[in-house]
Amino acid sequence: MEDRALLDNMLKTKVLSELQDVGPFSSSRPDAGNILAAQQRLNIKKDLVNLRKRIEMLHAIMENEASTLTTENALLKQKTMEREGLFRTFDILDNKCKDGLMAKEGGDEEENGLMTKEDEKENVFIEEEEETTALKRTAFDHVPLACDSLDGTLFLRRAVAANSEVSLKIPMLSLDDTLPVAPKVSTANEPNDFKLPDISRSKKGNLGPLPSPPKLSRMVKRVGRIAKLKTHRGKRALDERASKVLENDKVTLFVRGGKTCNNVTDVMHDLYALKKPLARNMKRRNPFHPFEDETPFERFSTKLDASLFVFGAHSKKHPDSLTFGRLHDGQLLDMVELQVTSYTPAKDFDAQKITVGAKPCIVLEGTNWEESSMKRVGNLMVDWLSGVSPSKIRLQGLEHVISLTCVESKILLRVYRTQLKKSESNLPRVELVEMGPSVDFQVRRTKLASDQLFKQACKQPKQLQQKPRKNTSQDVFGNKLARVHIGKQDVAEIQLRKVKALKKMPEGMDSEMPEEVDEDS
């Protein structure tokens, strides 16, 4: 109404201004001025007619918009009421769940002989209703499934899953226990048979058809329950991935990036031969950036049960790069990026190759390993190259030696084959023959764990921790050292055995000493 009054005032103002421009009109003199004034009057009338048409059109548009808003408000109100009805429904279900809890607690009283007659009647009533499920409906028969304007039935399922008590046994409801349902709201512009669109069956949502009420009730009962394993194979798979006192040998993943060069591929091939059988080669290329996002490697580690990885890539900023890393508890622990500056493949050496799964001897050479920046890198490389963990090792089983020499910021990797030669002593003479590969690395980037996280990763379980014993210690090589306290000895009280050789007195001793009597004679 305010808009219409404003338009009328604007129309009157324009008409008055037009009349003032024309001036006084006199019909007694039909001269040229009067004819011009008459033409201007006709033009004003035409403008007035056009303005009235435009005003009527604007009024019609405003009425349509008002009716549309009324319809939308009615729909919104209807959906709000339906959602309130759904919440009331869940309140009733919660009360039923609590009744189920009380009935469950009453079962313990029955075992102790403390169950009352009223409790027995209620349990009999519940059992009878469970047996006649075909004649009764569940509480979800009355729940408006398409009540949410966004997710449809997903709202119902999510609300049920969010309630922790629904996983309990819900008693069946009789036909008389009706639940509140939102009333229907209709407007003047809406037909009486208006229905909300079924969002669950729409192509956009792609949620599929709604389940039947009995099936939906069974789904609700299964919410919150832990699925029990039915096969021994599944149990063995979970036991292998569970935490152990003595963990399995660490498996290494070999991952290639989006772009690699021949040097990187050949180095990874030789390292793969050294790590067999504790190695898995990913055949597809993966355009990852480990220093920007390590989540892909954490996902692979959890899926394939591998705690070590090497990632090979080649780019303009980081050419010929190999990234060595390790994980702890499914999260990244340490990672270092090394650039291949020099490489000689293993096939260029004539030495005999090693046996698959052999335990290597690892040697760290150079004082630079003692620096704070390189100490953790050396620990990572030893962990990465350690291989299997046998209980016992024979001398002939030490077939190869891996040498890591640190010179400033370079790491020189050399692999030697051991040859046992004859010697004058019982121990054989050992000779080293280089068998490859021979790689020179340049340290580029590092991403190391904090001291607290590293200490937590190195923590041993209590079952492996031995009780500290007094006066015992252990050196760097694992040798056990002990300190023994001996009491004071009195030499005068020592009983000496009389030997026949002592009968004859040596020359120069006093001859006045009495002769010893032979007790055996």
Image (tube, rainbow, N blue to C red):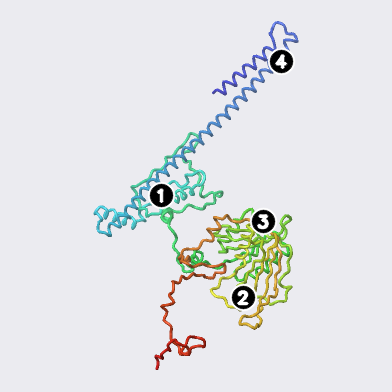
Of the numbered discs 3 and 4, the one sitting upstream in the chain is: 4
Query: Which marked residue is nearer to the observer: mark 3 or mark 2?
Result: 2
- Taking the view exactly as shown, the residue that stands out farthest to the bottom is 521
Q: Quadrant of residue 321?
A: bottom right
Give the residue type at disc 1: Asp
Give the residue type at disc 3: Arg
Which numbered disc covers residue 398? 2
Q: Quadrant of residue 24?
A: top right
Q: Give the residue at x 46% y 68%.
A: 231
- What residue is pinned by disc 4? 39
Of the numbered discs 1 and 3, the one sitting upstream in the chain is: 1
- Say whether residue 484 is left or right of residue 433: left
Q: Position of residue 240 (x, y in %)?
A: 51, 66
Q: Residues within 10 Å of mark 4 (few under 14, many from 20)?
A: few
Of the numbered discs 1 and 2, the one sitting upstream in the chain is: 1
Q: Position of residue 87 (x, y in %)?
A: 42, 44
Give the residue type at disc 2: Leu
Element on which disc 2 rests:
loop
Q: Position of residue 230 (x, y in %)?
A: 45, 66
- What residue is pinned by disc 1? 141
